[in-house]
Image (cartoon, grey):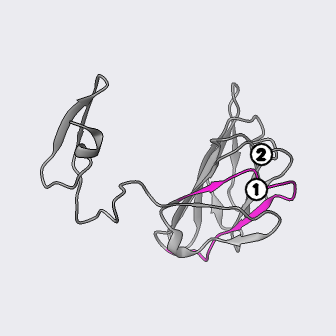
Amino acid sequence: MSLKEILQPTSTPVSTSLAGHFYSMYVDSSSQSGSSLLPPSHVIASAGATTNIPASWSGSKILVPAIGTTGAVLQLPAVSAGLNYEFVLSANQSGQTVTVKSATANVSGPLTCGPSTLTQVDASGSTNIIFASSDVKGDWCSVWSDGTSWYAKGNSFVASGFSVS
């Protein structure tokens, strides 16, 4: 059975073995949007300007490429229960920072940094989560809202991969 056949909507669990690994899953066709089971993704491509992240992108992985020496600001929408985003660097950053910005100082949560000795950056009471200018492809942070605050978590392979303000 191919992976494509496995991922077709069905009302019964599907089990199979691919490449020596056993998989068992249930695909609920009532919640499937379009033909993909992956969350939607968006690519941020403008450098030096603020990109307003719309509420309609909630649930998305937002890919951030290397975007020049001026960096980027990704402005979160107003808090609303259930909004959630994951920001993923899709290229090494070289000299620019990427800032995930809230309208007010209502961001909390741990951001983990470091390739060998791990450190935690505490975002409690912050407005900005800042990816360092030396962060690498695959570093990420996610934020979600309960309607009052934004909660964050993230990982960077760089020793000082995140800062907050």
Whether residue 51 is visible here, answered yes or no, is yes
Secondary structure mostly taken by the magenta-highlighted segment of the chain: loop
Q: Quadrant of the N terminus?
A: top left
Residue 114 drawn at (x, y percent): 71, 33
Determine whether 26 is above or below 144 in the image: above
- Look at discs 2 and 1 and give the one toward the viewer: 2
Find numbered disc 1 in the image and state the secondary structure of the residue it sits on: strand
In the image, is 59 to the left or to the right of 43?
left
Q: Circle 1: is it few (<14), some (14-19), or many (20+) Cα within 10 Å?
A: many
Residue 60 drawn at (x, y percent): 51, 61
- Find the residue positioned furthest to the top: 20
Q: Circle 2: is it few (<14), some (14-19), or many (20+) Cα within 10 Å?
A: many
In the image, is 38 to the left or to the right of 126?
left
Q: Which residue is drawn at 78% across and 61% down?
A: 72
Whether residue 147 is visible here, answered yes or no, is no
Say which mark, if any, is on residue 93: 2
Q: Quadrant of the C terminus?
A: bottom right
Circles 2 and 1: CB atoms closer than 8 Å: yes
- Give me the C-alpha separation between circle 2 and circle 1: 9 Å
Q: Residue type at mark 1: give it.
A: Val
Residue 53 drawn at (x, y percent): 62, 71
Residues 18 and 139: in front is 18
Residue at the spot of label 1: 98
The stretch drawn in magenta includes residue 74: yes
What's drawn in magenta, residue-wise? 61-80
Q: Which residue is drawn at 35% across and 55% down?
A: 37
- Tell me how many marks there are: 2
Residue 153 drawn at (x, y percent): 59, 50
Q: Residue type at mark 2: give it.
A: Gln
- Find the residue positioned furthest to the left: 12
